[in-house]
Image: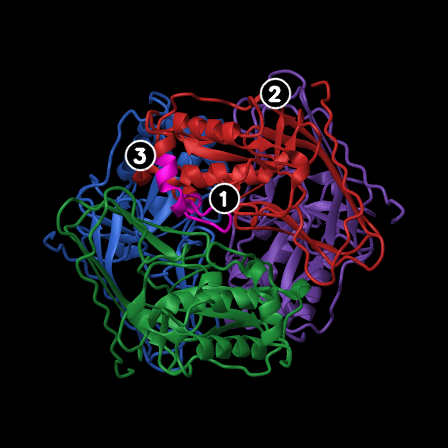
Chain colours: A blue, B purple, C red, D green
């Protein structure tokens, strides 16, 4: 899952996907609209190199005060993102979510309060990934990676009946550079970006894939004999706009 | 989610869905193809009565020996059912699944071995539902409800790279009668029915909804003020075929 | 194509579909969201009887003055209904459509002017169907059936860049009773009902199927040896609302 | 509609889509699975430049003798391609199609006979496009462009109950080079390529879009003030395979 699509606030102007050695590759669209590629990797060295030129906003939209949407008014396509999922056991977060937002206006501000809570209690530490864990366990940690922090944010939003979904993609200003994960919440009639790992939403984001949680949007899902990942490099450069 | 659709091996000949008091109801199709109905229930007594006349097989198909499909040959639409989900943390069952099927031919027979394991270690006890739990916890119990046993079966199949999905519906011979849950596994090029709660697959089944696990196929998902369920009755009668 | 779905302004409360002699029937959803049934009819007498209880409005919405939507603002799902189709060669109606609406505010009122033109120049004559013809030929006639009049309306709307689609269904007040066809046009941000065969939009309508024109929404499409239609009866009754 | 997708027998390795001056562009997928781009072109000079690197076969598959599929066995997704459409009034070709294939085995060979008929009676003359016409009119001509010849082939196949669809794309060996159109017919359980303009199926083809006929797969559909097309250049180069 490495091929961004043109969509809201991003336009794919150029894209490349090189497989070496070249093998037959089949592309399909999953339930969430993500482009997925399937292939049988040969034994031996194998590499995938992708690059993409995307027109994106300098900063993600923010909307303090944007209203909470009553469940009956939510579009049908947002409903799957209200349900608990593998790494976002939202049904366990009812009390915490209520507590964190007891003084907060329903909607965007609740999501912002959740993000503040995560930022204040968990340190973003990109180097310490010890395997994928679910939101209840993330909540017991003092340090976490982007994926974990997104899971916690998603579980807390859903506990307030706010649809929330995982996004995997690129962030231009990420340091150190890597693939990145954040989440979006549906308030005020649209999806808004939230990122507990960053102080603000500056820096162009490129979404590659959307899902309920990391189980849906793994960069790759591998079956069969174990694969040794020998190198993974990610770089993002700002181009002068035409 | 109470409206069965015509599909493989079932044909809906007559169907009724009565809401009392009558309120505006909106119907949509979810990501799995299930028909869902949305409504705002008024305060006070509220009832939904559905009935359906379905032409179904007397016995679900079985296929001992049906082959295991290599992941690269699986149809794309089965792939979501290989991933871990909220109540089927399949990544924790790799060892157990391998152990249970060490002597078994890959494919249908592995699923049958999994079902045997569940039947032998967990007693089906329809009355003891103490809330929804996930497969790792089901595996520590000695008694369980149909939903729990299905979750365990699904998690074990997925751990063998066999797509498995939850089914909610009716079983004519269920005793005591109630809504029922079982699972299907994709082997030999199609979905087959498995039901750890029953000794065999006799008795017509009617599928209402399919999903990754119980989170996707709840009969109802309720938001807002708590609702008291005062009565739920399910009855299934065999009609003489025309 | 005989199975109405719950949707905007209609809720299917009870539905029946009886096939005699009973044969395996497969149901699927076409590109327009219509439920379709496929079956191989046996030699000899064969009948299909359907009935449906639907909650519908007493009168279709009207919206004089509703605005014309610029093409760039139309939802993507309306765009197929802007293109010429088999029986609605809209590209031939540019001049006539402009002429008919030269004094009319863009949007709903243009559609109403088109309907008036059809009513004034072509007499609705349900008994004279001489086979399906396209809009250019309809426009040369002085009498026509509902399907033909809808085709002409659709072609004229599309010639003004207003999305228009065919609807097949039931109309409670139709006289003589039969299956019926009308059209919908997309103005003011939603689909509105137009029916050149009726003086007004009183009388509950039940939509069975939507499409570009009659080619998409035939009640049945038959292949193989010729079938003799020996009887077709349609009846609609108003029920007291619960 | 200028963005090919990876699919059966083609893999998009690199792709570029440049708009000058740059304007917001929205991408969506139509009913046939084609990627479509929407934009509001500014007044003045405006250009779109696309390029794509695709891995494709040197020659399209052929399958003399491939069987005719009875309508009841056709996959549901092929059924729309059996119906008459704007430029392929297949219902008018029943007699001609039967006559052309009276000595021919049902299936692939019927399609081949249809292609032979078109080749023998109509000269491919790329320069003479006088506006889009439908298959009945094409059949009266002695010279035609690729699109017209495809329409005639599609109408004749459908008249034999063989699903047939329009393809727009590139053909490496086309002379003079331009966008190209051909058709596919569904026989022997899959889609096969047919091209009445070429003596054989040598030369890599890249499919950009599929549809019922040219109405569905126009390279661009333009609304609003007339646009003057000042230049259109197409070039295809064979790359050495990696």
Count the marks: 3
In the picture, the disc for residue C135 is 1
- Residue B45 visible, this angle: yes
Q: In the rendered image of this protein, does residue C128 appear above or below residue A29?
A: above
Question: Could you tell me if residue B161 is visible in this image?
Answer: no
Asked if residue C95 is among those painted magenta in the image, a careful observer would answer yes
Instruction: Name the chain letter of the residue that bears numbered label 1.
Output: C
Residue farthest to the left, as pictured: A240
Q: Chain of mark 2?
A: C
Pointer 3 chain: A
* The one of B76 and C30 positioned closer to us in this rendering: C30
Cα separation, mark 1 vs mark 3, equals 64 Å
Question: How far apart, in angstroms, are the residues tagged by discs 1 and 2?
Answer: 30 Å
The residue carrying mark 3 is A117
Secondary structure, mark 3, is helix
Q: Main secondary structure of the magenta part?
A: helix
| Mark 1: secondary structure | helix
Closer mark to the observer between disc 3 and disc 2: 2
């Amino acid at each position: 899952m490495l091929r961004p699509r043109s969509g809201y606030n991003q336009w794919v102007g150029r894209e490349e996907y090189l497989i070496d050695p070249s093998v037959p590759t089949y592309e399909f669209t999953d339930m969430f609209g993500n482009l997925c590629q399937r292939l049988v990797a040969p034994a031996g060295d194998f590499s995938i190199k992708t690059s993409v030129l995307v027109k994106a906003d300098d900063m993600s939209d923010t909307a303090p005060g944007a209203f909470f949407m009553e469940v009956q008014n939510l579009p049908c396509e947002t409903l799957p993102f209200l349900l608990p999922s593998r790494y976002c056991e939202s049904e366990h977060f009812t009390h915490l979510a209520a507590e964190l937002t007891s003084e907060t206006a329903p909607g965007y501000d609740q999501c912002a309060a959740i993000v503040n809570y995560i930022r204040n209690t968990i340190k973003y530490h990109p180097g310490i990934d010890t395997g994928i864990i679910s939101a209840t366990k993330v909540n017991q940690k003092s340090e976490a990676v982007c994926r974990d922090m997104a899971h916690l944010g998603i579980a807390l939003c859903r506990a307030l009946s706010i649809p929330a979904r995982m996004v995997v993609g690129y962030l231009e200003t990420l340091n150190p550079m890597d693939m990145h994960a954040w989440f979006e919440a549906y308030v005020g009639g649209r999806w808004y970006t939230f990122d507990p790992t960053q102080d603000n939403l500056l820096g162009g984001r490129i979404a590659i894939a959307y899902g309920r949680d990391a189980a849906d949007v793994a960069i790759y899902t591998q079956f069969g004999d174990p694969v040794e990942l020998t190198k993974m490099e990610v770089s993002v450069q700002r181009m002068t706009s035409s």
